[in-house]
Amino acid sequence: MAYPKTGNEVYVSLNLSNTMLTGIGKGTITREQVSVDYLKRLFAEYGVIVSAKPEQRRLLEIVNETYDLQLEIPDSLKVFQLSEQKRRLVIINVQGLRRKGGSLLPEYTDEEFNEATFSFVKYYVQSRHYDDLVAENERLKYALEQELEWRNRTDS
């Protein structure tokens, strides 16, 4: 299955870096753990762009074999920034592999790959700042309370 090209593709990476967030400006980023079934629906709707180093090819192959995500594995690193509104990023968290300075190593043995486990976290960039969302929520809550008071009033 080839995922569509929509212009609003979901980025997939094995790590999160500050450079990915450069240029966002004032906004809100939400983070949530997601399931493989959710990812398949998300990718089918928006498409997907994988950003990974060539030495991470085997990890992506294992993810595809294990979860049938059918991710295209790039030949070179595709650098991106979440600078547009409503951009989605999925980070593939890898546990159980040795690291150096917090980073994955360029190579692992088959035994080490067999010990790896994966989880998926979606980051979503909203164009509205958290403080603005909180203020709007307070205004809506106040308006609702006023409406309820009006409806539940008793005229004496």
Image: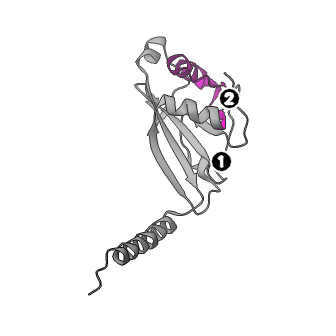
Would residue 51 be seen by someone viewing this image from the given angle?
no
Q: Residue at x 45, y 67 (%)?
A: 137
Measuring from the top left, give residue 93's x and y in whole percent: 47, 33
Q: State which tag comes first along the sequence, 2 or 1.
A: 2
Q: On screen, 145 above or below 2? A: below
Measuring from the top left, give residue 76's x and y in whole percent: 70, 29
Q: Is residue 77 left or right of residue 98?
A: right
The answer to whether residue 61 is magenta is: yes
Measuring from the top left, give residue 59's x and y in whole percent: 54, 22
Q: Quadrant of residue 13?
A: top right
Secondary structure category for the residue under label 1: loop
Would residue 156 be seen by someone viewing this image from the given angle?
yes
Disc 1 residue crowd, few under 14, some 14–19, many 20+, Cα 10 Å: some
The answer to whether residue 105 is magenta is: no
Q: Quadrant of residue 1?
A: top right
Mark 2 vs 1: CB contact within 8 A: no
In this view of the protein, which residue sits in the foreground, 30 or 43?
A: 43
